[in-house]
Amino acid sequence: MTIAIIGATGQLGARTIDALLERGVPAGDILALGRNTEQLQSYANRGLRTDALDLDDVDATAAQLKGVEKLLLVSVGTPGQALGPRGNAIEAARRGDIKHVVYTSALQAPTTILSLAAEHKATEELVAASGIPGTFLRNGWYTENHQQEFTSAREHGVVANSIGDGRLATAPRKDYAEAAAVVLTTPGHEGQAYELSGDHAWTYADFAATASQVLGQPVTYEPLTPEQEHEQLLSFGFDEPTAGFMVALHGDMRDGALAPTPGDLARLIGHQTEPLETTMRSWV
Ligand SMILES: NC(=O)c1ccc[n+]([C@@H]2O[C@H](COP(=O)([O-])OP(=O)(O)OC[C@H]3O[C@@H](n4cnc5c(N)ncnc54)[C@H](OP(=O)(O)O)[C@@H]3O)[C@@H](O)[C@H]2O)c1
């Protein structure tokens, strides 16, 4: 049985391939589709089937998916313009006769206040409308999104943003990837939506305390108002739309959009998610 991955060349795709191989899927049963030819070549060197992806060409993508049973559709596409390529991928899957689509969505996509999730909700609706049995992996936040702040905390001893007491239930990409591999290799997931997040929701005060411990040097958290953060981002050289986007995202985080800890991720992978401290230690 072949498993195709659209978005195989990205970081989540790469970790999902590792997880599939670790679960004993033969390399030749994985079809990696992506645009990055170097990354595709490295997969081909490991024995995977690979092909260059052009989601503007639905016929060609449908032809690549012929005879494939399962498709992992990673949420490809630039935010704000993602529905085009995702919609084309789903149409190609329909024409290619895919039997099961697994889509990497966003935590609580249908109901969340997280503005980033609107295109995920719309993509879930496209999957449902396609008639192909689907599974939604509603991924929460990656711990790795905070590596840059950790590096900055190491240099300056302070982390500052407007997230305040907002909690973030993060997990590293490899945990989400393992969940994808479980769903792609075990039966009974069609029609399911999983709310995937880390087991422990931390605040920035926790982040600073953990960073202090890991680095062996003082790190403090400085809460900012949204206005202060906006000014600071502009002073750091971010343009107005980016600064506005980040302040709005941090507002959603402050309001708890990424705090839920329903435990679906640990249940799927059969172990606790990796704690923040462990991931931080891997950055030192
Ligand atoms: N949960 C979170 O914290 C979080 C954070 C950031 C993003 N995300 C979402 O999760 C997805 C996967 O994360 P990631 O870390 O693997 O991202 P990533 O490393 O940036 O990988 C993105 C993948 O999307 C592909 N892609 C982008 N636009 C495409 C297009 N128009 N047509 C075909 N392929 C396209 C890239 O292909 P090539 O490399 O071959 O060009 C790559 O395979 C992201 O795309 C984003 O939607 C989630």
Image (tube, rainbow, N blue to C red):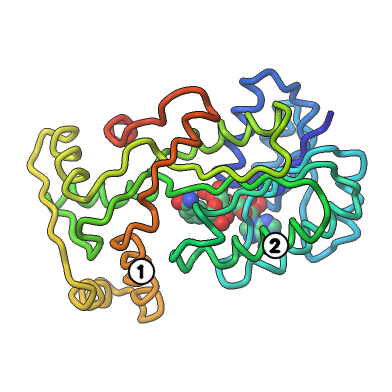
The quadrant of the picture showing ligand 1 is bottom right
Residue nearest the viewer, comparing 4 with 151: 4
Q: Secondary structure at mark 2?
A: helix
Residue type pointed to by label 1: Met
User: How many numbered discs, if any?
Assistant: 2
Residue at 50%, 36% (x, y): give it. Answer: 264
Give the residue type at disc 2.
Glu
Q: Position of residue 114 (x, y in %)?
A: 44, 64
Residue 194 falls left or right of residue 273 = right
Determine the residue located farthest toward the left in the rendered image.
218
Please state the horizontal and vertical placement of residue 7, each as a whole percent of the image.
66, 49
Q: CA distance from mark 1 to mark 2?
A: 27 Å
**Left/right of residue 176 with respect to residue 154 in the rendered view:** right
Badge 2 local density, few (<14 within 10 Å), some, or many (20+)? few
- Give residue 282's position: percent from left, percent from top: 33, 31
Q: Which mark is residue 246?
A: 1
Residue 125: which numbered mark, if any? 2
On-image quarter of the N terminus: top right
Q: Quadrant of residue 5?
A: top right
Q: Residues within 10 Å of mark 1 (few under 14, many from 20)?
A: some
Q: Nearer the viewer, mark 1 or mark 2?
A: 2
* Residue displayed at 19% across by 40% down: 211
Q: Residue at x 14, y 33 (%)?
A: 213
Q: The residue tagged with tag 1: helix, strand or loop?
A: helix
